[in-house]
Amino acid sequence: MAGQDTGKYSGMPQVAARFVAQRILMKSYFASSVDAHVHGRENLTQLKAPFIAIGNHTSHLDACMIFCSLPWRLSSNLASGAAADYFFSSWYKAFATRLFFNTYPVEREGLRNRKGLSGELLSAGVPLLLFPEGTRSRTGAMGSFKPGAAALSISRNVPILPIALVGNYAAMPYGTPTPVSGRPPVHVVFGRPMKAGPAEVALQFSERLRRYIIELHDTTARAYDMPTQADYDRAVALRTAAVDGELPPY
């Protein structure tokens, strides 16, 4: 719906509140909870808003680590798409997620009264954080990408910043409210900003982005002796075979 208020995602009072929430409260908490490493900062030098940041999605840590790892000039107005049916189902959830992550509602199903807000935010100069898988992985394996982020990039002529998140699944698996003990290692890997080729449609661009994020993930995982996407896929296949009776469970 056209004419939605995009100013509240970049206004000075909101930016000041987010600075305190993200750079003081959230960053301090996660510095004591995980051993975070950031790679590819050189790929951010020429990046300017508006842009779309995307990453693999395995944990509630994902958005936290991206916001904490980006320089403030890129994250101060970064708006994160969040499921309207969950994060905006009550005032206190909506308040907390807006305070820390500048969230805006994304409709997964049902009413589409906020359709077009992503595009309006980009047109207003507000960068976006989206997870193209649509939901967190339950296994650590990366799912297929929905082409929405790629389509937005093409239609609004803005670059996509691909980000690989390594170790977040082990550090805070699905269903756990806090990171596991022992400050587990996590890695945030910034790739080079990308745009679609002249004849590339959204589906093709989205798949190219997915392959690139897998490459970023696995290069870092191998360097630090952590599971690659192939390792996660193999574990899923073995569990599936055990459930189907093809292999004894273990």
Image (cartoon, rainbow, N blue to C red):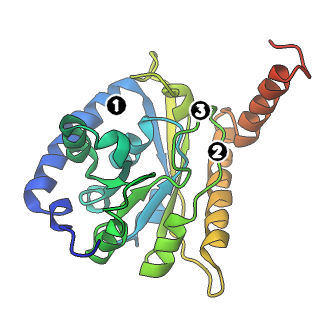
Q: Nearer the viewer, residue 194 or 223?
A: 194
Residue 137 percent coordinates (x, y): 58, 38
- Callout 1 amino acid: Phe
Left-right relation of 209 to 85: right
* Quarter where residue 244 is shown: top right
Q: CA distance from mark 2 to mark 1?
A: 24 Å
Rendered view: 115 above or below 140:
below
Q: What residue sits right under mark 2 in the picture?
A: 142
Instruction: Single out the residue that lies furthest toward the front.
Output: 110
- Callout 2 amino acid: Met
Q: Secondary structure at mark 3?
A: loop
Instruction: Single out the residue that lies furthest toward the right.
Output: 246
Q: CA distance from mark 2 to mark 3?
A: 9 Å
Instruction: Single out the residue that lies furthest toward the left.
Output: 13
Between discs 1 and 3, the one toward the N terminus: 1
> Which one is in front in this view, the residue at disc 2 or the one at disc 1?
2
